[in-house]
Amino acid sequence: RYVERTEAQARLLRVIGNLLINESDDSLHQTVGPFLEQIEPAETPDPETAEPSAKGAIEFAEAEQLTLAAALDHENPASLVSNLDHIERAAGKVKELLSIDTWRRLRGLKHLAVRKDGQNRSVFDDTLADLIDGALDNLASFVGNLTDNMTRTHGWRFLQVGRRLERGLSTAQLFTSVFSDPAHVGPTQISALLEWADSSITYRRRYLNALLPERALDLLCFDESNPRSLAFQAASLRELLAALPHVDPVNRHPIDTCALRLYSRLGLSNSTTLLNHAAESGTGDPAAFFEAAREDLASLSVTLEQTYFAHTALAREKQPETLIA
């Protein structure tokens, strides 16, 4: 989950950096705002002392500092460099289960984060771009090693479940922000979404150069053949979960209920219906749809944790006795 979370964050920071460099100050709020909402600040501002800012007022300097801190600040536990540390720490607990090549990739991530500490900080220099590119390269190598070399046991299935949960959560959260006002989703935001999801080439091969919201949703939300789409995550989760020990041919487990709810939500909707209903009602239905999908994924995560990873008395009380490992 840390690996997938870090990849999504690296891609997000690259998109934000490119938008900051290429967009004018007047358009920053509309284009960069939804993406900046995904960044967790190092400190939560005190509501009693924080100064209220004008709606839609995003200053370049403020956005730049927020972006750089989200990438390079070791004091921020949610920053990119901190997540790289989290990956190494989590992997270190099962080091004996990782191959030498896989461990080398993880060590490379750690060294990459250390090398970037204390360097000049600006979206116009190479520090941010080098960190992001290096992180994505090493993460791709790590995932490739796992995909090619790991035996298909329950351990591998849980790794895949974690990846699908995190990818689905990050997609649902970002789409909730971007489509909070569907009428103002323009080509720049669509292009940024496609870049974040590494789906630009697929989109242009399928739809040529017309950047339209409904087509982007078709590809990034409802297309089960696209490994980056929400529908793909939902379908993969159902397939992976069906092979885990909790499965009962008679009684559906809460894990499978959560997975089915997400899969059905996506299967019973489409981009045209979603956007047309929002345009007619003006209630922002796409944002509510993606927030509901995020809640489905969060519920699935909690239920998996309670079933397989929580060993307290309270957790055991919440689960059927026969399903506790």
Image: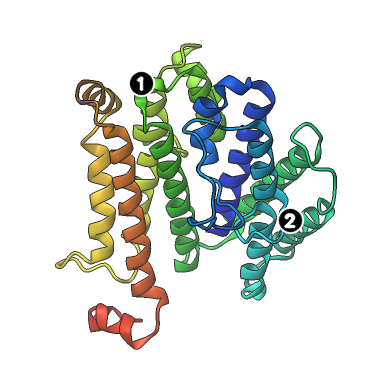
Question: Can residue 189 be seen by looking at this rendering?
Answer: yes
Pick the quarter of the image with the C terminus: bottom left
Q: Position of residue 7 (x, y in %)?
A: 60, 47
Say if 20 sits above or below 304 in the image.
above
Q: Is residue 117 left or right of residue 221?
A: right
Label 1 crowd (10 A; few <14 / some 14-19 / many >=20): few
Asked if disc 1 and disc 2 are in contact, CB closer than 8 Å, the reply is no
Callout 2: helix, strand or loop? helix
Q: Quadrant of residue 266?
A: top left
* Residue positioned 32% across, 53% down in the render: 295
Q: Is residue 298 left or right of residue 56?
A: left
- Nearer-the-camera pick, 139 or 284: 284
- Nearer-the-camera pick, 312 or 252: 312
Callout 1: helix, strand or loop? helix
Q: Quadrant of residue 2?
A: bottom right
Q: Position of residue 133 (x, y in %)?
A: 72, 40
- Nearer-the-camera pick, 220 or 175: 175
- Please name the amino acid that badge 2 sits on: Leu
* Residue positioned 45% across, 61% down in the render: 157
Disc on the earlier residue, 1 or 2: 2
Q: What residue is pinned by disc 2?
A: 109
Q: Which mark is residue 135?
A: none
Label 2 crowd (10 A; few <14 / some 14-19 / many >=20): many
Q: Position of residue 311 (x, y in %)?
A: 40, 83
- Nearer-the-camera pick, 236 or 305: 305
Q: Is residue 64 left or right of residue 240?
A: right
Q: Which mark is residue 183?
A: 1
Q: Quadrant of residue 178?
A: top left
- Please name the amino acid that badge 1 sits on: Ala
Return the residue found at the far bottom.
Answer: 313
* Residue positioned 66% across, 52% down in the render: 80
Q: Position of residue 52 (x, y in %)?
A: 50, 43
